[in-house]
Image (spheres, rainbow, N blue to C red):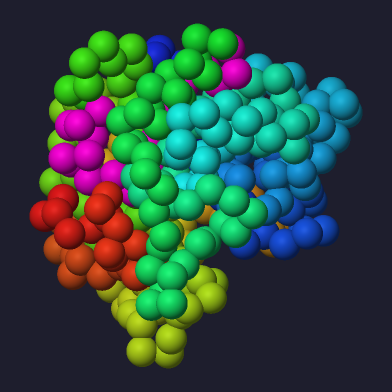
Amino acid sequence: MVPSVTLNTGAEIPIVGLGTWRALDGQVTEAVKAAIAAGYRHIDGAFVYNNEHEVGDGIKAMIDQGVLKREELFVVSKLWNTFHVPSLVRGACKKTLSDLKLDYLDLYLMHFPMGAKPGEDEFPLDEQGNLIPDDSNFVDTWEAMEALVDDGLVKAIGVSNFNKDQIEAILNKPGLKYKPATNQIESHPYLTQEKLIDYCHSKGITVTAYAAMGSPGRPWVTPEDPSLLEEPRIKNIAEKYNKTPGQVLMRFHVQRNVIVIAKSVNPQRIAQNLQVFDFELSEEEMKMLLGMNKDYRAFPMLWGTKHKDFPLNAEY
């Protein structure tokens, strides 16, 4: 059994989940099936990954085979930027549910605080390569997401890529019905996010880390970019425990009580990423990993820098 973290709704979310970003057609259904067979009970997806249909096929196959019941699975999706106008939120959620072949989501996140021009184009950019905004405010978008909880389409709602001030804006919203259950952010030893994680935890908001291994497969990676998986200090720790650098990077978050998602379509690696509960990093090792912080982002969101709600200019 994978240990869980309790959300402020009382629901339990398994601390390790399968990520599905950049999992290609034909691979993702099998990856989801392999993950469930290996013991995963938390699947993280999003509309913009353009593969929720295949994720749904994988989930349905395993439920149909009697491997597990729907209520044993924790399924996460995300509202995309082009659906921030409050009147579009419900339709976006229903599309995701239809693709996933599910009646409800366990958690629905606002993928970014930045609303973008509605339409077919998922990344509406101007000539300078900047995101074309809509006229929405993420607090109003949040209110529309709260209605999804009331209507039973989602069990919990949260945010992703939000900074402290943006979370405060939601928490201070007059008539707030539901606090964010989680904030999903990039985090790893080169971007430890200690202040933001401490802040979220102090407000009863869980944190989920993405790019826990530095997202070595991201399309814009360059040979000059630092590599966590090749970092000698991480490799040394891995050798000591007879683990992989990836497992050490996963364990780093587990010990901070941070939920962590790892994307893979390789069945062996999918299983490996779950094998992080049979060893423990020492206090010194945790200190060393936290000391590697250099505020390095694998996801600098350059397309959003001119947006009024760009989250990364704040200290945290």
The residue shown at (20%, 31%) is 169
**293 is higher (above) or lower (below) than 251:** below
The answer to whether residue 112 is left or right of residue 104 is: left
In this figure, what is the number of numbered marks?
0
Q: Residue furthest bottom?
A: 223
**126 is higher (above) or lower (below) than 93:** below
Q: Quadrant of the N terminus?
A: top right
Task: Write down the region rendered in magenta.
Answer: 152-170
The answer to whether residue 268 is left or right of residue 314 is: right
The residue shown at (44%, 51%) is 116
Q: Where residue 17 sits: x, y (%)?
A: 53, 41
The residue shown at (43%, 19%) is 146
Q: Is residue 154 magenta?
A: yes
The answer to whether residue 263 is left or right of residue 238 is: right
Q: Residue furthest right?
A: 65
**Res 291 seen here:** yes
The answer to whether residue 292 is left or right of residue 303 is: left
The residue shown at (23%, 35%) is 167
**Res 280 seen here:** no
Q: Where residue 39 sits: x, y (%)?
A: 65, 36
**188 is higher (above) or lower (below) than 10:** below
Q: Where residue 203 sits: x, y (%)?
A: 19, 25
Q: Is residue 147 magenta?
A: no
| Residue 208, quarter of picture | top left
Q: Where residue 52 sits: x, y (%)?
A: 70, 44
Near-viewer residue (99 or 251): 99
